[in-house]
């Protein structure tokens, strides 16, 4: 199938404050001296993706990326032949709420990275971030995904396969370790066949 996504290009600006810890290794001290720190960082994110369809479990989609966006092609009617193309059921406005959560996580990591690289900080405490985001561009995107499932004790378990990289992620039944091992042995063969078919082109 082809799943719809919103692709955001966003400029993130953030100001942060925190308490940081340094250790005086030259003096042979391992105790940390704590001092306040302030700073700012700005980053352009071109690859913030959020699914635009509510037809699949979002917890599965989270783990089958990333996608090689530099190899994107223009979507044409040829791509719909023999494929299940899902509709855009989530608006760009609602998708933006999810995108902001992703950006918040990235911004925090950028601020921590900036602190550690520019100040040789070893401990960061009480980090507070004031961030703002400016949308530069929004695009519609379809990504290729294979969906398969198996049934165990009356319940269906779903597996997704990245149609570009053949990365696999799915649900599994929770039972005894022996039963889980037997279940995975059977599933591995089925996934291997599907993945192999994709890798052969």
Image: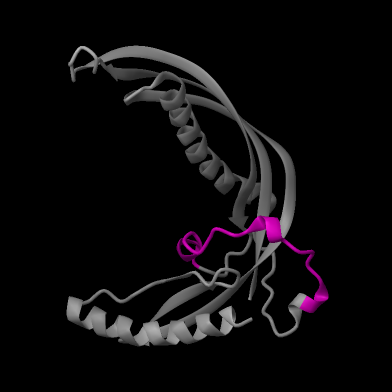
Q: Against 97, is 197 above or below? A: below
| Quadrant of the image occupied by residue 124 | top left
Q: Would residue 160 be found to the left or right of residue 175 on screen?
A: right
Q: Position of residue 32 (x, y in %)?
A: 23, 18
| Quadrant of the image occupied by residue 119 | top left
Can residue 176 be seen here? Answer: no
Q: Which quarter of the rendering shows the N terminus?
A: bottom right
Q: Residue at x 51, y 34 (%)?
A: 107
Q: Would residue 111 be found to the left or right of residue 87 on screen?
A: left
User: In front: 125, or 200?
Assistant: 200
User: In front: 29, or 112?
Assistant: 29
Q: Which residues are magenta?
A: 57-78
| Quadrant of the image occupied by residue 146 | bottom right
Q: Would residue 16 be found to the left or right of residue 181 on screen?
A: right
Q: Against 64, is 176 above or below? A: below
Residue 60 lies in the magenta-colored region: yes
Q: Residue at x 62, y 64 (%)?
A: 53
Can residue 162 be seen here? Answer: yes
- Farthest residue toward the right? 77
Residue 156 lies in the magenta-colored region: no
Q: Position of residue 162 (x, y in %)?
A: 55, 70
Q: Against 116, is 149 above or below? A: below
């Amino acid at each position: 199938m082809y799943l719809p996504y919103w692709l955001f290009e966003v400029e993130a600006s953030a100001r942060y404050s925190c308490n940081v810890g340094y250790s005086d290794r030259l003096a042979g001290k391992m105790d940390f001296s704590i001092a306040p720190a302030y700073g700012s960082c700005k980053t352009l994110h071109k690859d913030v993706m959020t699914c635009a369809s509510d037809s699949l479990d979002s917890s599965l989609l989270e783990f089958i990326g990333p996608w090689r966006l530099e190899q994107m092609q223009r979507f044409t009617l040829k791509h719909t032949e023999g494929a299940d193309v899902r509709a855009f059921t989530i608006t760009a406005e609602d998708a933006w709420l999810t995108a902001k959560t992703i950006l918040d996580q990235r911004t925090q990591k950028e601020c921590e990275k900036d602190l550690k690289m520019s100040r040789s900080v070893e401990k960061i405490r009480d980090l507070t971030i004031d961030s703002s985001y400016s949308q530069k561009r929004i695009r519609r995107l379809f990504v290729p995904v294979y969906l398969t499932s198996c049934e165990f004790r009356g319940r269906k378990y779903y597996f997704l396969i990245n149609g570009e990289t053949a990365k696999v992620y799915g649900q599994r039944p929770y039972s005894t370790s022996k039963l889980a091992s037997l279940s995975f042995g059977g599933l591995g063969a089925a996934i291997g066949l599907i993945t192999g078919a994709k890798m052969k082109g």
